[in-house]
Image: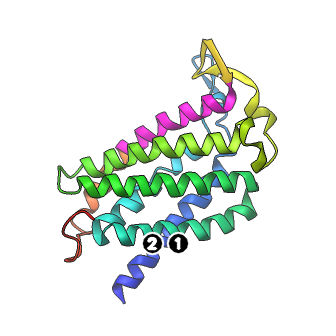
Amino acid sequence: MLTNRTFLLYVALMTVVVVASNVLVQYPLPGSIAGMQLGDLLTWGAFSYPVAFLVTDLTNRQFGPRTARKVVVAGFVVAIFLSVLVATPRIAIASGSAFLLGQFLDISVFNRLRRQSWWRAPLIGSLFGSLLDTAIFFSFAFASVFALFGPNDPFALESAPILGLMTAEAPRWVSWALGDLSVKILVGLAMLLPYGALMSVVRPMPAVKAPA
């Protein structure tokens, strides 16, 4: 019973994170800093989504990769259903594809490194997962070549300085993707704090002994 409750808790946490991120990614940051428009660099979703890797890594640590994949799939199904209601279909498709592949990569990398230093598995797994997730999400959601998923966002396709550098320009979504990845890396580093704090509470189950 306790195991079932813990599993449902992980699924609920994953669902909340993904649905919130699907909404927040549609809102660029307001204001500017050092002459750069923050809306050209980031959306609010960059700050919330990395928490999904924390949920996945804690599940993987406690129950192993098989259960972690179940949490990802369960969270994906519920989150996509809700995302269609609160976001555009194209955002839902992009988010679902990026979520599944990014999280599965994180699970695989984490499991291979779980016997090394405590910080290696969650950090390296989330970095690889974030890189893949960002590339897939922003391409599917905004690139013209994937217009079959839904209409293009004119604002996202406008030219903008890459990361605020006036010497190079690209579609605004490319700058969003680079800014998003930068924040994900920073938040991924920050997520080591709660992960480390929870290690004594979220202990591996007896069956979780070796990478699989």
Give the residue displayed 78% in from the left and 47% down from the top.
148
Rendered location of residue 85, percent (x, y): 75, 64
Quadrant hosting residue 103:
bottom left
The image shows residue 68, relative to residue 29, as above or below, that is below
Give the residue displayed 68% in from the left and 56% down from the top.
92
Q: Quadrant of the C terminus?
A: bottom left
Q: Which residues are magenta?
A: 171-189
On the picture, is 80 further left or further right than 86?
left
Circle 1 sits in a helix, a strand or a loop, which is it?
A: helix
On the picture, is 21 further left or further right than 2?
right
Three-letter amino acid code of the residue under disc 1: Ala
Q: Is residue 44 visible?
A: no
Q: Is residue 79 visible?
A: yes
Give the residue displayed 41% in from the left and 77% down from the top.
7
Give the residue displayed 68% in from the left and 68% down from the top.
81
- Few, some or many residues within 10 Å of mark 1 (<14, 14–19, 20+): some
Circle 2 sits in a helix, a strand or a loop, which is it?
A: helix
Rendered location of residue 163, percent (x, y): 57, 23
Between the C-alphas of marks 1 and 2, the distance is: 6 Å
Verify whether residue 140 appears in magenta.
Answer: no
Task: Say whether marks 1 and 2 touch (CB < 8 Å).
Answer: yes
Residue picked out by circle 2: 70
Verify whether residue 178 appears in magenta.
Answer: yes
Three-letter amino acid code of the residue under disc 2: Lys
Q: Which mark is residue 25?
A: none
The image shows residue 32, relative to residue 83, as above or below, that is above
On the picture, is 110 further left or further right than 77?
left
Rendered location of residue 91, percent (x, y): 69, 51
Quadrant hosting residue 127:
top left
Residue picked out by circle 1: 74
Out of 3 and 107, give the one closest to the viewer: 107
